[in-house]
Amino acid sequence: MHTIGVFDSGIGGLSVARAIEKARPGDRVIYVNDKAHVPYGDKSPEQLLGFVVPILQGLNDQGCEVIVIACNTVTTTLIAELRQRISVPLIGIEPMVKPAAAATRTGVIAVCATLATLKSKRYAWLKQTYAHEVTVLEPDCATWAYMIEHNQLNERRIGQQIDSLCAQGADQIVLGCTHYHWIEDVVKRFAARRAAILQPEQAIINRLQAMLEPQP
Ligand code: DGL
C-alpha cells in the first residue's frame, strides 16, 4: 500500500483524487484542498507560494510518498520552486498543449484555463515549444472555477463559449484546470463531436504507476 497526497485549491483536485482511488484501490489517498483561499486563478505567485508550502509540508508529515499537485495554476506558476522546498516527489498537472497540438487536424486548439495559468512562464514555454505552428484559442474562463466550486454553473454562457471555439475551428479543447473536469460532459455535449476534450487524469495515473511500481 502506498500513501498518495493530492492537493488543489478546491474541488477540482477531488476529481483527480477519485480517479486515482478508482485506479489504485489498494492505496491510501489523502486529499487536501485550500477552501480558505479558493479560487487560486486570480492570486499572485507570491500569495500562492505562501498558501501551498505549508499544505505540502503537512502532506509530507502525514507520510505521503508522492504528492499530486492537482492544480494547473500551482503547477505552471510554482512547480520548480516547490520541488526545491519539498522533499517528497511532486507530480504536477499542466495544460495538455503538447498532445492537443499533435492531434489537431484543423490547426486550431483551445485551452481553457485560469488567468494565472495563462499568464505563467511555463504555459508560455509549452505554447512556444509544442504549439508554435498552431493557433491557440484562450477563452475567458475567469468565472468558471468559482461557478463550479459553488455549484452555480451558467450552462448557457459556457455553451456559447464552447460553440464559439468550435466555430473558430478548434478541434481539440484542453481542460487546463482541474475544476473543469467536473463539467467535462457539459463541454462535450456543447462541442457536439466537433472537438475532442482533453484532460490529464489517465496520464497522472500512468505517471503514478511508473513512479510507485517502476519496471526493472
Ligand atoms: N483547479 C485549479 C487549476 O487546475 C485552480 C482553480 C482556481 O482555484 O482558480 O488550475
Image: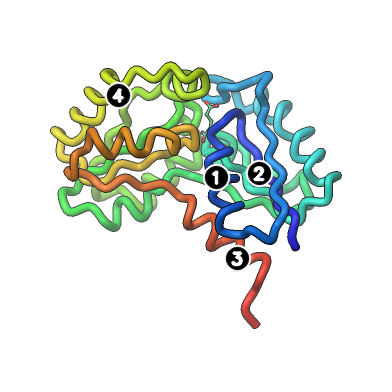
Mark earlier in primary sequence (3, 2): 2
Which mark, by number, is residue 6? Answer: 2
What residue is pinned by disc 1? 16
| Closer-to-camera residue (196/84) | 196
What's the CA distance linking mark 3 and mark 1?
15 Å
Q: Amino acid at mark 4?
A: Ile
Residue pictured at 59% horizontal, 28% vertical: 10
Label 1 or label 4, whichever comes before in sequence order: 1
State whether residue 111 is above or below residue 100: above
Q: Secondary structure at mark 4?
A: helix
**Residue 29, placed above or below residue 71:** below
Q: Report the residue at 18% width, 45% height from top.
A: 193
Query: Which tag, 1 or 2, sits closer to the chain's start?
Result: 2
**Of label 4 and label 3, which has the lower sequence position?**
4
Residue 203, horizontal then vertical, whole percent? 48, 57
Residue 139 position in % (x across, y down): 31, 27
Q: Is residue 138 left or right of residue 203?
A: left
Asked whether the residues under the numbered discs 1 and 2 touch, taking CB atoms below 8 Å apart as contact, a structural biologist would say yes
Cβ of mark 4 under 8 A from ligand 1: no
Which residue is denoted by mark 3 in the rendering? 209
Q: Residues within 10 Å of mark 2 (few under 14, many from 20)?
A: many
Query: What distance separates the C-alpha of mark 1 from that of mark 2?
Result: 8 Å
Residue highlighted by disc 4 = 158
- Of the 4 image quadrants, the one containing the C terminus is bottom right
Position of 149 with respect to 210 (left or right) is: left
Q: Report which quarter residue 157 is drawn in.
A: top left
Amino acid bearing label 1: Val
| Amino acid on which the number 2 mark rests in the picture | Val
Which residue lies at the image location 64% right of the left edge and 58% below the top edge?
25
Nearer-N-terminus badge (3/1): 1
